[in-house]
């Protein structure tokens, strides 16, 4: 839970606000053999073009109510984020994470054939029907309760197009559960937003990124690196041969891990910022929660950093995750850090001005009374 700011003593005048961080959600979807689903964005995409990403996207009004942009609770896990994550996963990959209300087995997913699911994806994407209504009409309910919060990411302050993205883990039933495996074969959305959809071990996705065969951005690389230590089959063929007991043990280890830390991984909010330069790469700090959450008790990961070289339309290269204690903090007068600090200063001014305006309004009401 995020505590509300207690106030500010600054008397700075309001300035132009930062671009709003659009509420969104993504799922790290774990296959029956503990592989991870990534989708390849279309080249013409306005964000993360050609990159491999987790299924997810914007929160729609139909997903549920959200607090206003000025409310820090907008950046908390909530039913709307969970519903949006399940809906976007279905629209983008064809995998429906919904419980079968007509089956008394508590872990039974709703079973629909591929043609029926494709018709539903098309109708929902084109606003011909609502996702929740469509699921209910087929005797199901979105399985929001099985989502495990696993960090929130706020786009850095100096980026024009910003997001507040709630990440979740979701574990598809293990192969021995009796649910047909055809339900878990991802497909692209026909090139609307993605051109490929594939499950691979986390370690294999990382290897492809290091070899620059795919594009990953810091949130995806960082989270894949964390879970690769637990869901650690080296190649797909090995993963498929693991026993159900070992697969479940890997999952249990990951679930235990996300409960650790201060705050726990389910509550961390990360807004990467340039800590220093290392040759052509930036060393990004992960401890800041973002300008919207300054003055709250929300924090990111103070122990780790990520190295990355941003290459414009070509994406990224040279990404690695390391320990913050091994990085010497050096104040550098580089342009990216100045932009970041200036954006944070403007946001502090805006918030201070808003608080002063609220105080004046409250004083006016008291005087009238």
Image (cartoon, grey):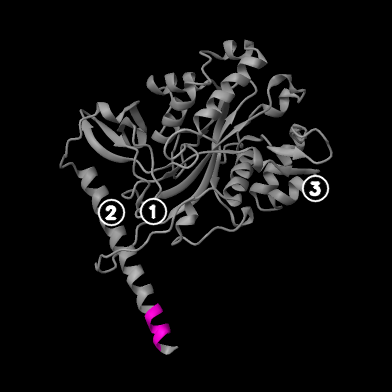
365 drawn magenta: yes
**205 versus 347 height, above or below:** above
Q: Is residue 132 magenta?
A: no
Residue receiving disc 3: 137
Q: Image point 27% across, 39% down: which residue?
A: 274
* Range of magenta residues: 362-367
Q: Earlier in the sequence, mark 3 or mark 1?
A: 3
Quarter holding residue 310: top left
Q: Mark 3 to mark 1: distance in Å?
A: 42 Å
Disc tally is 3
* Image position of 364 with respect to 295: above or below: below
Does dot 3 land on a helix, a strand or a loop? helix
Which disc is residue 296 wearing? Answer: 1
Mark 3 or 1, which is nearer the eye? 1
Q: Position of residue 52 (x, y in %)?
A: 48, 31
Q: Residue furthest bottom?
A: 368
Residue at figure coordinates x 27%, y 29% from the top left? 325
Q: Position of residue 217 (x, y in %)?
A: 40, 34
Q: Residues within 10 Å of mark 2 (few under 14, many from 20)?
A: many
251 and 225: which one is in front? 251
Which mark, residue 306?
none
Q: SS class of the residue under badge 2?
A: helix
* Looking at the image, residue 290 lies above or below residue 99: below
Q: Quadrant of residue 355?
A: bottom left
Q: Nearer the viewer, residue 256 or 323?
A: 256
| Residue count near mark 1 (Cα–Cα under 10 Å), binned few <14, some 14–19, many ≥20 | some
**Residue that carries the numbered disc 2 in the rendered image:** 343
Using residue 53 as the reference point, say whether residue 106 is left or right of it: right
Q: Nearer the viewer, residue 88 or 348?
A: 348
Q: Is residue 351 left or right of residue 71?
A: left
Q: Nearer the viewer, mark 2 or mark 1?
A: 1
């Amino acid at each position: 839970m995020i505590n509300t700011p207690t106030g500010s003593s600054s008397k700075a005048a309001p300035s132009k606000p930062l671009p709003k961080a659009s509420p969104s959600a993504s799922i790290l979807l774990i296959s029956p053999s503990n592989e991870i689903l990534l989708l390849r964005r279309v080249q013409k995409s306005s964000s993360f073009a050609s990159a491999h990403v987790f299924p997810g996207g914007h929160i729609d009004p139909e997903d549920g109510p959200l607090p206003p942009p000025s409310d820090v609770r907008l950046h908390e896990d909530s039913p709307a984020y969970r519903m949006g994550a399940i809906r976007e996963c279905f629209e983008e990959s064809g995998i429906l994470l919904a419980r079968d209300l007509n089956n008394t087995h508590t872990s039974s997913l709703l079973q629909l054939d591929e043609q029926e699911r494709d018709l539903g994806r098309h109708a929902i994407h084109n606003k011909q029907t609502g996702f929740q209504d469509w699921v209910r009409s087929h005797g199901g309910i979105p399985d929001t309760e099985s989502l495990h919060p696993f960090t929130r990411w706020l786009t850095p302050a100096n980026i024009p197009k910003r997001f507040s993205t709630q990440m979740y883990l979701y574990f598809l039933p293990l192969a021995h559960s009796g649910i047909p495996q055809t339900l878990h074969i991802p497909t692209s959305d026909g090139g609307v937003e993605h051109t490929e959809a594939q499950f691979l071990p986390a370690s294999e996705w990382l290897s492809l990124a290091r070899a620059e065969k795919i594009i990953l951005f810091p949130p995806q690389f960082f989270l894949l690196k964390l879970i690769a230590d637990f869901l650690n089959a080296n190649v797909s063929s090995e993963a498929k041969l693991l026993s159900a007991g070992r697969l479940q043990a890997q999952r249990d280890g990951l679930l235990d891990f996300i409960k650790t830390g201060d705050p726990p991984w389910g509550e961390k909010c990360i807004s990467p910022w340039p800590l220093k330069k290392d040759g052509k790469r930036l060393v990004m700090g992960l401890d800041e929660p973002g300008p919207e959450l300054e003055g709250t008790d929300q924090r990111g990961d103070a122990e780790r950093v990520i190295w990355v070289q941003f290459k414009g339309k070509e994406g990224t290269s040279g990404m690695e995750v390391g320990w913050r204690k091994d990085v010497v903090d050096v104040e550098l007068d580089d342009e990216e850090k100045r932009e970041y600090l200036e954006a944070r200063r403007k946001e502090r001014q805006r918030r201070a001005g808003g608080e002063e305006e609220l105080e004046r309004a409250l004083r006016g009401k008291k005087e009238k009374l």
